[in-house]
Image (spheres, rainbow, N blue to C red):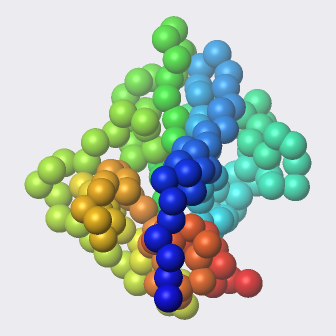
């Protein structure tokens, strides 16, 4: 029989999920939310010179054009990578309004799309509010990747465990 978590255990879980790593230049700030990452590798395939988990730090913003980094982050299926422009940035703000922007809000009239990846997770896009069994908001986002194999240690989010 499954035991309910204590308030202390829930607090530790929330703290783990709220970890944020920050990488910045004078023109771009990139945030990585490890607990939201499904490790699909899209960022590494798009820009291996920037996103390299074998190096520390694993994100090196000086390795490529910042506008191309923004495009790569916009293609992140989970929203685990996000960006914002600091005040005074030389990047055209119109090029930083995609789904990877921390300020991005999907059009409320957009239909939610759920795509089942063959032998993988559900890719969810649109104005999403994910609610737990107790009616508590888990995450509000424009994109997320949800586990459908049951192996994720970060359920309901995919953590890439199905690939192992």
Residue at 30%, 70% (x, y): give it.
133
Q: Is residue 102 left or right of residue 128?
A: right
Residue in view at x 80 percent, y 52 percent: 52
User: In the image, residue 126 lies at what x, y percent?
Assistant: 27, 59
Quadrant of the rendered structure where residue 125 is? bottom left
Q: Nearer the viewer, residue 103 or 134?
A: 134
Q: Position of residue 82 (x, y in %)?
A: 52, 41
How many numbered tags mark residues here? 0
Looking at the image, which residue sits at the far left? 109
Q: Is residue 94 above or below residue 9?
A: above
Q: As drawn, which residue projects farthest toward the top?
A: 88
Q: Is residue 1 visible?
A: yes
Residue 141 relative to residue 31: left or right: left
| Residue 65 in sight from this viewpoint | no
Left or right, 84 with respect to 38, comes to left
Q: Residue furthest right?
A: 55
Whole-percent x and y of residue 143?
A: 38, 58
Quarter placement of the C terminus: bottom right
Q: Nearer the viewer, residue 44 or 157?
A: 157
Which residue is found at the position 31% from the left and 54% from the top? 137
Q: Is residue 93 above or below residue 13?
A: above
Q: Position of residue 39 (x, y in %)?
A: 65, 65
Locate residue 152: give its quadrant.
bottom right
Residue drawn 64% across and 16% down?
A: 26
């Amino acid at each position: 029989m499954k035991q309910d978590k204590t308030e202390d255990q829930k607090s530790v879980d929330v703290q783990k999920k709220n970890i944020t790593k920050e990488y910045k230049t004078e023109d771009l700030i990139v945030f990585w939310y490890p607990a939201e990452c499904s490790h699909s590798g899209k960022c590494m395939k798009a820009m291996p010179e920037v996103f390299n988990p074998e190096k520390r730090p694993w994100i090196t913003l000086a390795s490529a054009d910042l506008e191309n980094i923004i495009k790569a982050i916009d293609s992140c299926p989970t929203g685990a990578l996000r960006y914002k422009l600091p005040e005074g940035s030389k990047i055209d703000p119109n090029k930083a309004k995609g789904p990877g922007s921390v300020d991005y809000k999907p059009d409320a009239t957009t239909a939610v799309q759920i795509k089942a990846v063959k032998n993988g997770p559900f890719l969810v896009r649109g104005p999403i509010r994910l609610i737990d069994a107790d009616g508590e908001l888990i995450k509000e986002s424009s994109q997320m990747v949800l586990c459908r194999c049951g192996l994720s240690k970060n359920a309901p989010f995919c953590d890439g465990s199905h690939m192992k």
